[in-house]
Image (cartoon, rainbow, N blue to C red):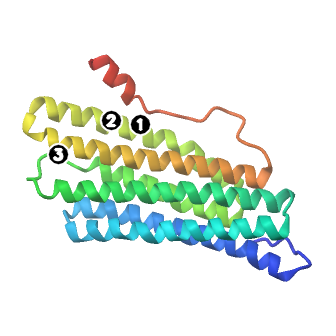
Amino acid sequence: MSGSGHIVKSYDEELDGVRNTIVEMGGLAESQLEAAVRSLTERNTELALKTVEADAAVDKLEHTIDNMAIRVLALRNPVADDLRLVISALKIASLLERVADYSANIAKRVIALNSAPAIAPVSSIPRMGEMVRRMIDDTLKAYTKEDSDLAYDVWARDQEVDQLYNSMFREMLTFMMEDPRSITSCTHLIFMAKNIERIGDHMTNIAEIIIYQVTGEMPDQPRPKGDKTSITMIEKT
């Protein structure tokens, strides 16, 4: 990790502390998503409950980052690259907290789903989950290495997640129309998939923040999007 080499050593230590806490928070959020999806595929209610409980640790780290950032802003009066780092950390921490919330929401639906007989296939959700988990992992690498190229790569991948979500959404609608008994289960699965899709959106947001932090500029092309489910719902009404 490149250091800024400030005369006051404690200043560098404070900035490193902000960076390290962001990475720690991201690692917990990634683990939560992985556990939530695994609790679904294994029909593991105990794991789902633990995933919900783990959300508190991420919330605590967000508060830690808030306090660290406020201290740096108040005492160090950062400018240029340092200011971008601190402001970026505040934004990224908020997004990672939402990622953990979405994972907890998935786990809560797993708990509800496990109380009913398994009806609808769930293969698309693990695929989406792994795709987005890799986005989280690469986003954290881009942040740690200050790698704007890798951040751009993550930024471009969101469209693939959207396309898989669209496919899964249509599949679930078909199951519900063919077998009304599957409506409750399919509805839970659709919301789980939407939560994963939203996590992908947040990784795209974080990738943009990293690009700005490193280069001082935002991506100059429109964000690639492929979520067509709202159009599908309008066409079916």
Q: Position of residue 126 (x, y in %)?
A: 32, 54
What residue does disc 1 label? 163
Q: Residue furthest right?
A: 7
Q: Is residue 92 above or below residue 237?
A: below
Circles 1 and 2: CB atoms closer than 8 Å: yes
Residue under the point 54% across and 51% down: 203
Q: Position of residue 216 (x, y in %)?
A: 80, 49
Residue under the point 87% across and 75% down: 5
Q: Position of residue 72 (x, y in %)?
A: 77, 69
| Residue 44 falls in image quadrant | bottom left
Q: Which amino acid is tagged 2?
A: Ser
What residue does disc 2 label? 167
Q: CA distance from mark 3 to mark 2?
A: 17 Å
Residue under the point 67% across and 50% down: 209
Q: Which amino acid is tagged 3?
A: Ser
Q: Between 162 and 58, which is closer to the camera in this rendering?
A: 58
What residue does disc 3 label? 185
Q: Quadrant of the N terminus?
A: bottom right
Q: Secondary structure at mark 2?
A: helix
Circles 3 and 1: CB atoms closer than 8 Å: no
Q: CA distance from mark 1 to mark 2?
A: 6 Å
Q: CA distance from mark 3 to mark 1?
A: 22 Å
